[in-house]
Amino acid sequence: MSSAINLNLDIKGMIFDLDGVIADTAHLHYKAWCKIAWQWKFNLSVDQNEKLKGVSRNNAMRKIANWAGKNLSEKELENFADQKNAFYLNYCESLSPEDTLPGVVSFIDQCRRTGMKLAVGSASKNAKIILQKLQIIDVFQIIVDGNMVEKSKPHPEVFLKAAELMKIKPSDCVVFEDSQSGIQAAINAGMMTIGIGSSDLGDCNAQIQSFEKYNLNKLISQINN
């Protein structure tokens, strides 16, 4: 695994993962995955669910089927993945602007007011739906989701596509991620990385517990260090 490197500090674009960075929807994914697993009389653990962060829906379905000892065809896996998505979207109906994580909207607004380009880079195929529910979809110039890429994190495709669409160099981007696979994808893309949350994301340039009381001055200080 590559280590984070000291990159160009001329920041021109910010790329945000969605789940666990902008909003905490991980528990909704977990509830939906559990409904599938229960059909197989399998209890999906919280630790196993952590390993699904940043993973595409179909690949996550394969992992769960493997843990449950189920040998399923690709068609069967796709059908179960579609079921899971229907459960998840049903849970998401209750989402509102109050479900954004503390401080993130204020930080995004500060970045927007400086003229920085803003993007979402998410494995979720429902990213636009979630952002609409949170009422912040209009603050991002670019949204790259699971419908636009073929390869899952830690492959850098989602972040490289975001930089391409923003028309800026990867080395001028900062990525905010809450999973190791996402951090590694950003590193593989040649971007600066800020880890979010309490999980150990040791390869990132810096890590914060949350966006509360976080601002651009602190970001610049972290990257310069």
Image: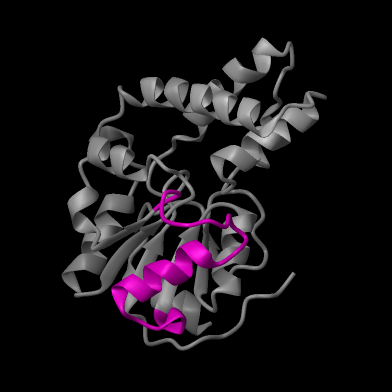
The quarter of the displayed image where residue 201 is located: bottom right
Name the spot of residue 194 as percent of width and height, x first. Answer: 50, 65
The quarter of the displayed image where residue 113 is located: bottom left
> Residue 187 or 209: which is nearer the viewer?
187
Q: Quadrant of the N terminus?
A: bottom right
Q: Residue at x 69, y 36 (%)?
A: 62
Give the number of callouts: 0
Above or below, comparing residue 208 to residue 125 in the picture: below
Above or below, comparing residue 33 to residue 22 in the picture: above
Q: Does 164 lie within the magenta span?
A: yes
> Residue 107 or 192: which is nearer the viewer?
192
Furthest residue toward right: 69
> Residue 105 or 62: which is nearer the viewer?
62
Q: Residue at x 71, y 29 (%)?
A: 73
Q: Which residues are magenta?
A: 145-172
Residue 188, visible in the rendered structure: yes
Name the spot of residue 148 as percent of width and height, x first. Answer: 41, 55
Q: Residue at x 46, y 88 (%)?
A: 8
Name the spot of residue 132 as percent of width and height, x first. Answer: 23, 40
Q: Residue at x 52, y 69 (%)?
A: 193
Residue 205, visible in the rendered structure: no
Q: Does 158 lie within the magenta span?
A: yes
Above or below, comparing residue 149 to residue 55 in the picture: below
> Residue 77 or 188: which is nearer the viewer?
77
Name the spot of residue 218 as percent of width and height, x first. Answer: 40, 71
